[in-house]
């Protein structure tokens, strides 16, 4: 098939490359000439493992191309909207960008257009999209499907090509057949539902994951009181077949990135508008908003004060495997410590350090490109983003570089198996719920 991918953010870059890999001829379309120029040389807007190589392979084969010319949708069998939903500081998602693209493509839609949307939308948006098109083109016939993306940042290519399931929301039997053939080689688990149900499945999935994490945060707090180890409790939970080995039951200092919280906010907004209460969803949202405070709460008794103390962060991106700083929990904690008078040092092997100034005030921190230099004269090192390379550090050397309490704060219990080695090296290891 000839497929037009409209919107080349994280979703669009992955879909473009992976649909080409599945044998389709793909044209990616975006407003940004810089994004298009870079993609045509194999450079994605957001770096992901395996992505650049896929782009280069299919660009060379001529199966993949990128353009700013929206008219290219006329030559497509399928038009796929993957415009990323922008997340505000309050974690509310905005569909403004999506409708901006819609206005541009509507004049070029052909009769019988097959439109698929995978942008992350609040429930009810698909109906608004269809009404928007019908209002602008009263005589246009088109088929519509909502296929919620299920990509994991840092694992985008693998999560598309090895999908645990694909949800397809449509009332069109023709689109059901087309999309089931398209996805058959990446999953046997294709679920057909109504469009509103497909929208809600995305919200419900993220809300459930967020609920699981907020639940284990509560459990970890109790573990500390009674002397239990939350990592052992999590192991026991996953061994229960009713819960499962992939359950989100790892205690930490909170989830970040904005994606889970965005879906919580979508649900809360719908509830507020319709005067219904969501005690569980509201509690999950509240728990996570407060969760990052556990870091300062646990550090304060050890350090006595944050004023004039030097705190180093190992890993500052939102998630390992991606350079994005959007809604980064480490930077949120850094801002809090800055307000308490601490000196902040940052180390991250992936991040473009010039991007940090968009999140933290210029001159308020020190970015260091070497982990040992970053730890020099630091009272505490905080690890929130779990980069695998951090486990290969020489802990004894790290301890020699530090001063004072020499706290190593493992905010995601990522170093549980290295806990003994960290302590033997002379570091004051602190975990969550342990």
Image: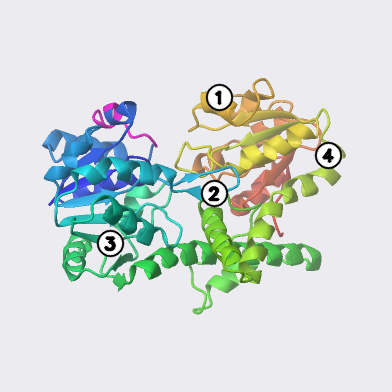
> Does residue 379 show up?
no
According to the picture, the residue beneath numbered tag 4 turns out to be 303
Report, in whole angstroms, how far the alpha carbon at label 1 lies from the one at label 4.
26 Å
| Disc with the residue nearer the chain's start (3 vs 1) | 3
Does the magenta run of residues contain 45? yes
Which residue reaches farthest top? 363
Q: Nearer the viewer, mark 2 or mark 4?
A: 2
400 or 41, which is in the foreground? 41
Q: Nearer the viewer, mark 3 or mark 4?
A: 3
Check disc 1: other Cα within 10 Å, few if <14, some if 14-19, many if 20+.
few
**Residue 234 placement: quadrant:** bottom right
Q: Which color scheme did the rendering employ for the protein?
A: rainbow
Report, in whole angstroms, how far the alpha carbon at label 3 lies from the one at label 1.
46 Å
Residue 89 in the image: x percent, y percent? 59, 42
According to the picture, the residue beneath numbered tag 2 turns out to be 258
| Disc with the residue nearer the chain's start (2 vs 3) | 3
Residue 315 in the image: x percent, y percent? 57, 38
Q: Nearer the viewer, mark 3 or mark 1?
A: 3
* First to last magenta residue range: 37-46
Q: On the picture, is 246 further left or further right than 293?
A: left
Q: On the picture, is 372 further left or further right than 317?
A: right
């Amino acid at each position: 098939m000839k497929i037009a991918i409209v919107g080349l953010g994280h979703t669009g870059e992955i879909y473009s490359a992976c649909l080409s890999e599945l044998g389709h001829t793909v044209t990616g379309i975006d407003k940004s000439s810089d994004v298009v120029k870079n993609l045509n040389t194999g450079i994605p807007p957001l770096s992901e493992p395996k992505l650049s190589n896929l782009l280069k392979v299919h660009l060379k084969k001529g199966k993949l191309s990128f353009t700013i010319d929206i008219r290219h949708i006329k030559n497509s069998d399928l038009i796929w909207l993957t415009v990323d939903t922008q997340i505000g500081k309050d974690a509310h998602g905005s569909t403004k960008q999506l409708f901006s693209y819609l206005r541009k493509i509507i004049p070029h839609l052909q009769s019988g257009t097959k439109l698929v949307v995978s942008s992350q939308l609040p429930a009810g948006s698909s109906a608004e999209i269809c009404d928007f098109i019908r209002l602008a083109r009263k005589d246009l016939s088109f088929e519509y499907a909502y296929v919620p993306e299920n990509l994991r940042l840092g694992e985008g290519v693998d999560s598309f090509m090895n999908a645990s399931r694909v949800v397809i929301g449509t009332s069109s039997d023709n689109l059901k057949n087309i999309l089931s053939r398209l996805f058959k080689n990446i999953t046997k688990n294709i679920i057909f539902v109504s469009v509103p149900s497909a929208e809600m499945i995305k919200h419900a999935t993220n809300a459930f994951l967020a609920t699981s994490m907020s639940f284990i945060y509560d459990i970890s707090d109790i573990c500390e009181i009674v002397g239990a180890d939350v990592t052992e409790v999590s192991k026991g939970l996953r061994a229960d077949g009713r819960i499962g080995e992939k359950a989100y039951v790892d205690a930490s200092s909170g989830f970040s990135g904005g994606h889970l919280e965005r879906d919580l906010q979508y649900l809360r907004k719908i509830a507020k508008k319709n005067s219904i209460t969501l005690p569980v969803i509201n509690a999950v949202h509240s728990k996570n908003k407060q969760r990052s405070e556990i870091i300062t709460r646990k550090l304060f008794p050890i350090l006595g004060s944050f004023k004039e103390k030097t705190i180093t962060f190992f890993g500052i991106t939102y998630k390992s495997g991606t350079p994005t700083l959007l809604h980064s929990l480490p930077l949120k904690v850094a801002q809090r410590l800055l307000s308490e008078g601490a000196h902040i040092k940052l180390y991250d092997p992936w991040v473009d350090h010039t991007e940090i100034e968009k999140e933290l005030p210029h001159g308020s921190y020190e970015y260091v490109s070497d982990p040992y230099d970053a730890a020099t004269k630091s009272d505490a090192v905080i690890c929130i983003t779990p980069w695998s390379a951090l486990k290969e550090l020489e802990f004894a050397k790290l301890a020699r570089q530090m001063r004072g309490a020499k706290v190593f704060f493992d905010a995601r219990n990522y170093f549980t198996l290295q806990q003994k080695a960290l302590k033997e090296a002379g570091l004051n290891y602190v975990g969550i719920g342990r």
